[in-house]
Amino acid sequence: MLVSAEIKLRSLEDTDLDFLFSLENDKSIWAVSGTAEPFSLADLANYISHAKQDIAIAEQFRFVIDWKGKAIGCIDLYEYNFKKQSAGIGIVILKAYRRKGFAKQSLTLLIKYAWEKLHLKQLHTGIFLDNKASLALFQSLDFEMVRQNNYVLKR
């Protein structure tokens, strides 16, 4: 578990099923998440049961962003590559909790984890140019555009 002053990043738990169902089936975020069709409860229950796999095996790991015991979003490491010492980052915060600093706290914790625990040397993310909030967030933590929609942070 990763902890800041206000939030913690924790593993998915069985009790997160309803939260994950509503988050993954929110059509307003499908364009940035790459989702094309709804997930069933069974699919997500299966995902949760396998979500605690070691990142080296699964090549991804999802953290729940927890504020005062409530799941308010997720931050993911994906495309984890041990040899290249790199991974991608994706983040989503429920609408009611956006613009309150939770995303920046989460991203800061995850970067520290990636550098210190996973010994990564590069993180990347894809952000559409019209997603001003995400652009500002990642740029505020020194991610640089390497090509359109692609941003990198190097250690």
Image (spheres, rainbow, N blue to C red):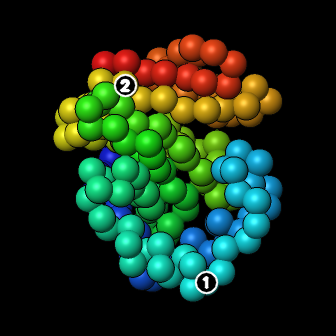
Q: Quadrant of residue 97?
A: bottom right
Name the residue located 49 percent from the left edge and 21 percent from the top edge.
152
Please name the residue shown 26% across and 32% down the image: 83
Answer few, some or many: residues within 10 Å of disc 1's Cα (few below 14, many 20 plus, some between 14 and 19). some
Indicate the position of residue 94 as horizontal and vertical percent values: 64, 58
Helix, strand, or loop for circle 1? helix
Element on which disc 2 rests: strand
The answer to whether one can see residue 7 in this image is: no
Left or right of 93, for residue 25: right
Vertical arrangement, residue 61 with respect to residue 12, above or below: above
Quadrant of the rendering where the N terminus is positioned? bottom left
Instruction: Kindly indicate the quadrant of the structure image that contains residue 82.
Output: top left
Residue drawn at the location 48% of the way across and 29% of the way down: 124
Please rate how many residues cluster around mark 2, counting C-alpha atoms within 10 Å: few if below 14, some from 14 to 19, many from 20. some
Judge by depth and name the residue closer to the eye, 40 or 74.
40
Q: Earlier in the sequence, mark 1 or mark 2?
A: 1
Residue 79 appears in the figure? yes
Q: Can you identify the residue that label 2 sits on? A: 122
Q: Which residue is mark 1?
A: 41
Q: Pick the residue in front: 78 or 95.
A: 78
Q: Which mark is residue 76?
A: none
User: As drawn, is 10 to the left or to the right of 136?
Assistant: left
